[in-house]
Amino acid sequence: MASTQAGQVAALIEALADGTVEIVDLTQPLSESTPVIKLPPPFANTPGLSRTEISRYDDRGPAWAWYTLTLGEHVGTHLDAPIHWVTGKDGADVGSIPPTALVGPACVIDKTAETEADPGYLLTVDDLTGWEADHGRIPDGAWVLLRTGWGARAQDEAAFLNVGEHGPQTPGPDVEASRWLAGERAIAGFGTETVGIDAGAAGGFDPPFPLHNFLLGAGRLGLTQLANLERLPPAGALLVVSPLRLVGGTGSPSRVYALVQNPHG
């Protein structure tokens, strides 16, 4: 068994070296201009990223540069831990999430055309079972990723948040799809290109913010503000999520990438 496992790791190293398998970065750049969710009064809002210089090759530190960072846990490409939501308050914080939950198959559900026609498109159970009809049952420990093309808006805060007269319009799962993801498949988590795992209109659903409610309440994970989902196949990629191991953390900015078979490699 040990020799078989060593052979599999060696084969992966060789595939990465020769380009047969490529690494696709799914992380949006994190900067002071990264869009941040805006909650209406009376709710408190998270800060975005800001930084204060400690030293920069000067009298405060002649050979080094470094900064103090201030940012919310849920800024940019980031992970939602179960304790982020009241239904998961007795669940895992970021620091106690097992690494096995952070690496798993990626199941990419492409609703780009639907979202282009309707920016508030709601993912349904039929969409999920339709994906399974084409690609097989969603594996245990998988990450379900909703591709909508929203990542193209990531550098324009107004377009990205897309707040109109009736609130934000962004895609996400409906109530029954949220319930299905949390209860019908043993997934590790759900990821999206938008600012949050729920649809923009989800505050008015019953229950409000159903994916946060059901998914995090079931001990699963959320992943937001992803990039480059168009570079992944519907099935067959391996997702790797790298949050800070933050004790007590409700979330963490994360570097996220996928290992993908290179069709030209």
Image (tube, helix red, strand yellow):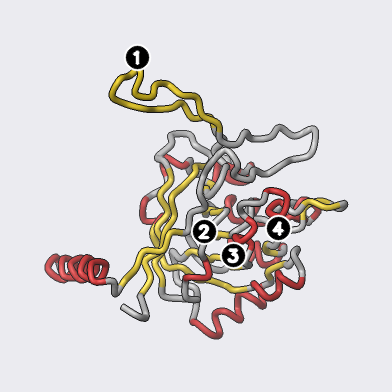
Residue 182 falls in image quadrant:
bottom right
- Whichever of callouts 3 and 1 sits on the residue coming sooner in the sequence is 1
Residue corresponding to mark 3: 181
Q: Which mark is residue 189?
A: 2
Residue density around tag 1, few if under 14, some if 14–19, many if 20 or more, within 10 Å:
few
The residue furthest bottom is 134
Position of 179 with respect to 53 (left or right) is right
Q: Nearer the viewer, mark 1 or mark 2?
A: 1
- Whichever of callouts 1 and 2 sits on the residue coming sooner in the sequence is 1
- Tell whether label 4 touches label 2 (CB within 8 Å): no
Q: Position of residue 93 (x, y in %)?
A: 48, 40
Front one among 53 and 231: 53
Q: Quadrant of the C terminus?
A: bottom left
Residue density around tag 4, few if under 14, some if 14–19, many if 20 or more, within 10 Å:
many
- Whichever of callouts 2 and 3 sits on the residue coming sooner in the sequence is 3
Determine the residue positioned at 55% across, 31% down: 50
Q: CA distance from mark 3 to mark 1?
A: 55 Å
Q: CA distance from mark 1 to mark 2?
A: 47 Å
Q: Amino acid at mark 2?
A: Gly
Residue 109 falls in image quadrant:
bottom right
Residue density around tag 3, few if under 14, some if 14–19, many if 20 or more, within 10 Å:
many
- Tell whether label 2 touches label 1 (CB within 8 Å): no
Residue corresponding to mark 4: 199
The residue furthest front is 58
Q: Which mark is residue 59?
A: 1
Q: CA distance from mark 4 to mark 3?
A: 15 Å
Vertical order, 263 against 122 (above or below): below
- Whichever of callouts 4 and 1 sits on the residue coming sooner in the sequence is 1
